Image (cartoon, rainbow, N blue to C red):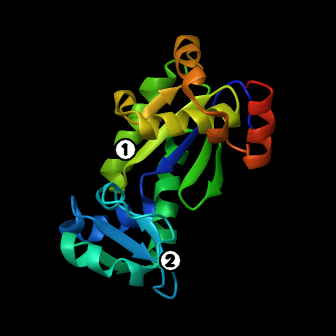
Amino acid sequence: MMSPKSIAISDSANFYVSAERVFDPTLINVPCIVLSNNDGCAIARSNEAKILGIKMGAPVHQLSDKIKEHGIRVLSSNYTLYGDMSRRVAEVYEDYSPRVEIYSIDECFLDWQFKDKEAHAKKLVAAVKQRVGIPVRVGIGPSKTLAKCANELAKKNPIFSSVCDLTDKSIQDYMLPRVDVCDIWGVGRATTKKLKELGI
């Protein structure tokens, strides 16, 4: 197991769409969705598609009017491509961390015992973009839970420029009170209800 002192998690932004864009630049800055195995529903959405209100899991037959109106590009999933791109991204991580723990196809936990944690993370973000073409975000924390929380903050707050470091006590003190308990990794509906009844 990795030391709890400082852990990072890096995830790929809109991974399936980002992987498709590497090989088809005409998809860049265009609303895109990637469909499930049977082309039945949206399992990945570009930011442009999210802005148009397309929800994860939306049945594609219910989106036909929106697809026509906004010129949304619709792609069948290509898991061979996504697996290969995931491997390439992880190879870059291995150059920046002594230990890489694959959590999912688009997320890895990284041992992050560096003096300037944020600067090292920004180098990693730039390296993945340059070498693989995939945009990633990095959350850093003293535990996996706080690293995941930092990663969510990096996604939702452009001010962090893709890297949020919750080992920085000032950032932790400012940001954590603004995080809803239901957004914490591992906190489901039942636990959220209990915590809110306790005033948490």
Q: Is residue 50 visible?
A: yes
Please state which amino acid type lies under the numbered disc 2.
Tyr
Image quarter hosting the N terminus:
top right
Q: Name the residue located 67 percent from the left edge and 34 percent from the top edge.
A: 181
Q: Is 195 displayed left or right of 160 in the figure?
A: right
Residues at discs 2 and 1 in contact (Cβ within 8 Å): no
Compared with 92, 75 (above or below) is below
- Dividing the picture into quarters, in which one does residue 39 lie? bottom left
Q: Name the residue located 81 percent from the left edge and 37 percent from the top edge.
A: 194
Image quarter hosting the C terminus:
top right
Could you tell me residue 182's position as x and y percent?
A: 66, 40
* Residue beneath disc 1: 127
What label does residue 79 carry, if any?
2
Q: Residue furthest bottom?
A: 38
Could you tell me residue 102's position as x and y percent?
A: 64, 54
Q: CA distance from mark 2 to mark 1?
A: 24 Å
